[in-house]
Image: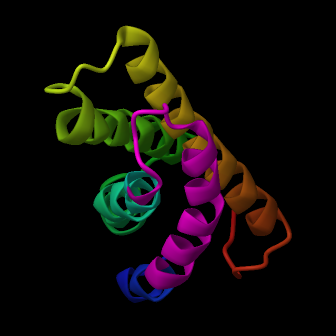
């Protein structure tokens, strides 16, 4: 894809991603986090990583296979989102290891779900993307 196509796709993909990930985070994040924080996390975490996954990594990894891109992107996003969430909300709080683990698991599941939905839509060529 060209940079202009990536920029065109960015808002569509972002909205789809938060539509998939936010409900999972609302249900999955540990109980000390308020509903407001859970909603915020759905928008903010994706806003932090999605531009890199959609705009930067495809260009950096353009000489590599799609499989390599997916492996890098789908490891990068949840790892960075877990770190950001932990830095923003958990590391100074009295969060237990169990609560932090639950938060990380929710973030990883949300990312896997949005990846899965994206792959299904891509397989149907709903976005006009080519494998």
Magenta residue span: 10-36
Judge whether 26 appears above or below 43 on screen: above
In the image shown, does 113 or 38 lie closer to the viewer? 38
Q: Nearer the viewer, residue 65 or 14?
A: 14
Q: Locate residue 17, reporting x and y percent.
A: 57, 64
- For the stretch drawn in magenta, the main secondary structure is helix
Q: Nearer the viewer, residue 42 or 120?
A: 42
Q: Residue at x 54, y 65 (%)?
A: 18
| Viewer can see residue 66 | no
Colouring style: rainbow
Q: Position of residue 35 (x, y in %)?
A: 47, 54
Q: Is residue 4 magenta?
A: no
Q: Does residue 24 show up?
A: yes
How many marks can you see? Answer: 0
Dividing the picture into quadrants, the one containing residue 73 is top left
In the image, residue 2 sits, relative to residue 57, either above or below, namely: below
- Examine the image and state in which quarter residue 90 appears: top left
Residue at 78% x, 67% y: name it: 121
Q: Residue at x 46, y 60 (%)?
A: 39
Q: Which residue is at the far top?
A: 97
């Amino acid at each position: 894809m060209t940079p202009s196509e990536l920029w065109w796709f960015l808002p569509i993909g972002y909205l789809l991603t938060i539509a998939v990930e936010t409900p999972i985070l609302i249900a999955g994040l540990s109980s000390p986090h308020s509903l407001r924080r859970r909603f915020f996390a759905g928008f903010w975490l994706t806003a932090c990583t999605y531009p890199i996954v959609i705009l930067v990594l495809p260009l950096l990894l353009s000489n590599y296979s799609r499989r390599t891109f997916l492996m890098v992107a789908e490891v990068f996003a949840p790892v960075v989102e877990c770190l950001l969430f932990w830095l923003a909300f958990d590391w100074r709080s009295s969060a237990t290891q169990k609560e932090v683990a639950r938060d990380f698991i929710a973030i990883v599941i949300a990312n896997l779900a949005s990846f899965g939905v994206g792959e299904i839509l891509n397989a149907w060529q709903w976005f006009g993307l080519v494998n």
